[in-house]
């Protein structure tokens, strides 16, 4: 019996990061995001913001999780702020920071659930 890799172990407990997805799975996530939110990037950015353990996030840091251009991530962070799910947390080193308005808001669980369903639809 072989020892599972760190990636395999992580996938058992939470869906893979958007930047780790196979192209056809990523396409499925983006199409679902477009149907849900009217924007193909919003679900990926919401999931990255929901999964972060940090008090605040910025577009540059989320770029490591989401394989999107920083300006596209920033646009989604601003949209999530307008919707009331994020709030401005200041500026540090020239980067605009955002924090979740409510850590336990049902939107974050919804985004994670929808993402998980797209990544592993048969489970």
Image (cartoon, rainbow, N blue to C red):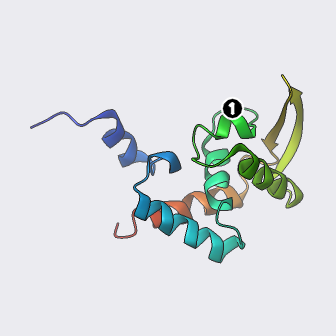
Q: Position of residue 27 (x, y in %)?
A: 49, 65
Q: Nearer the viewer, residue 51 or 37?
A: 37
Q: Quadrant of residue 58?
A: top right
**Residue sitting at the far bottom:** 35
Q: Which residue is mark 1?
A: 54
Q: Quadrant of residue 112?
A: bottom right
Quarter of the image that includes the C terminus: bottom left
Residue at 73% across, 46% down: 103
The local crowd at label 1, few if under 14, some if 14 to 19, many if 20 or more residues have their Cα within 10 Å, is few
Q: Position of residue 61 (x, y in %)?
A: 67, 34
Q: Position of residue 32 (x, y in %)?
A: 57, 72
Q: Nearer the viewer, residue 34 or 54?
A: 34
Residue at 73% across, 52% down: 72
- Classify residue 5 as left or right of residue 52: left
Q: Nearer the viewer, residue 70 or 111?
A: 70
**Residue sitting at the far top:** 93
Q: Quadrant of residue 109?
A: bottom right
Q: Is residue 12 above or below residue 43?
A: above
Q: Position of residue 55 (x, y in %)?
A: 74, 32
Q: Is residue 94 above or below residue 117?
A: above
């Amino acid at each position: 019996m072989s020892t599972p890799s760190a990636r395999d172990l992580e996938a058992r407990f939470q869906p893979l990061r958007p930047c780790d997805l196979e192209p056809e799975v990523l396409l499925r996530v983006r199409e679902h995001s477009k149907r849900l939110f009217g924007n193909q990037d919003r679900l990926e950015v919401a999931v990255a913001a929901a999964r972060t353990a940090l008090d605040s996030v910025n577009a540059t840091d989320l770029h490591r999780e989401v394989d999107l251009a920083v300006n596209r991530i920033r646009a989604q962070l601003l949209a999530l702020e307008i919707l009331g799910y994020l709030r401005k947390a200041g500026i540090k080193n020239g980067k605009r920071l955002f924090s979740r308005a409510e850590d336990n808001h049902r939107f974050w669980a919804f985004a994670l659930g929808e993402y998980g369903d797209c990544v592993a639809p048969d489970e």
